[in-house]
């Protein structure tokens, strides 16, 4: 594949933010008298906070009039936790240097709000690598809808067919494939063996495993 651009998801791929989103979500749901087990939480990984809240409020029968308040609470809690405790995932510095040396344009396509994107970009010191940032925050649909990836490709000035994308969530992987882009997926270690990842073009355990020959073979 003659890739001209690479697009990264953010949460759980570039920064270990998923545990803090999970904490924020569970803490907020507990305010409404319900709790999630980890297996339930993973079902909705990759959704925007708005859709996450709506899904679980409907599931548990919580009054929908509280969704906006719950969404704001989760985002506030998550940003605070990630700012304080978030760490880069293994291989972040390597992968950005790798694709810069390949001459690829680089973007981020995330379900997270731009307020968090800015926190993470500064925390990881990757602003100088980025040619585009696309957030699904205000789009009609978030992942697994492909729009955020298509928007990022448009901002990068490239065809979706020339993009390689990195994801860690199932909803994100579906969004990438729906956008007709190549997908490299790096699932959480406890989910790595699941067959649902077979829809990806490549499955890895870390960003550090990416090689030039691997990219050329896509």
Image (cartoon, grey):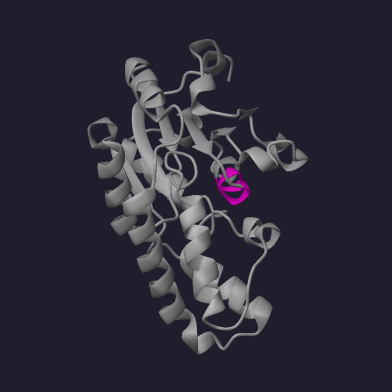
Q: Residue at x 51, y 67 (%)?
A: 25
Give coordinates of residue 24: x percent, y percent. Answer: 47, 65
The residue nearer to you, when weighing 218 against 10, is 10
| Residue 86 visible in the current orientation | yes
* Above or below, comparing residue 21 to residue 122 in the picture: below
Residue 59 part of the magenta-drawn span: no
Image coordinates of residue 172 in percent, x first then y, are 56, 47
Could you say which quadrant of the image residue 80 lies in? bottom left
Residue furthest to the top: 213
Residue 204 placement: quadrant: top right
Looking at this rendering, what residue extends furthest in the left direction? 128
Foreground: 31 or 172?
A: 31
- Say above or below: 22 vs 34: above
Give the x, y percent position of residue 120.
32, 46
Residue under the image location 72 percent in, 35 percent down:
198
Residue drawn 48% across the image and 40% down it: 13
Q: Is residue 87 left or right of residue 168?
A: left
Give above or below for 109 relative to 45. above
Q: Residue 104's spot in the image, x, y percent?
A: 36, 23
Q: Residue at x 53, y 72 (%)?
A: 53
Left or right: 121 in relation to 55: left
| Horizontal relation, residue 80 to residue 48: left or right | left
Query: Which segment did they paint magenta?
Result: 170-175
- Judged left or right of residue 146, residue 130 is left
Along the line of sight, the residue nearer the viewer: 161 or 20: 20
Q: Quadrant of residue 139?
A: bottom left
Q: 128 or 5, which is in the foreground?
A: 128
């Amino acid at each position: 594949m003659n890739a001209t651009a690479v697009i990264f998801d953010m949460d759980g791929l570039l920064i270990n933010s998923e545990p803090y989103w999970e904490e924020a979500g569970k803490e907020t749901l507990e305010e409404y008298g319900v709790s999630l087990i980890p297996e339930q939480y993973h079902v909705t990984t990759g959704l925007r906070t708005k859709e996450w809240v709506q899904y679980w409020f409907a599931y548990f029968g919580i009054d929908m009039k509280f969704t906006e308040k719950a969404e704001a609470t989760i985002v506030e809690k998550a940003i605070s936790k990630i700012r304080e405790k978030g760490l880069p995932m293994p291989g972040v510095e390597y992968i950005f240097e790798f694709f810069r040396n390949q001459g690829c344009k680089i973007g981020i396509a995330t379900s997270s709000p731009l307020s968090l994107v800015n926190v993470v970009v500064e925390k990881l010191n990757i602003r100088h690598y980025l040619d585009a940032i696309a957030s699904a925050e205000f789009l009609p649909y978030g992942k697994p809808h492909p729009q955020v990836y298509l928007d990022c490709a448009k901002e990068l000035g490239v065809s979706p067919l020339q993009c390689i994308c990195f994801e860690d969530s199932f909803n994100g992987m579906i969004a990438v494939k729906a956008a007709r882009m190549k997908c490299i997926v790096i699932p959480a270690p406890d989910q790595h063996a699941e067959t649902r990842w077979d829809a990806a073009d490549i499955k890895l355990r870390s960003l550090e495993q990416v090689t030039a020959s691997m990219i050329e073979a896509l």
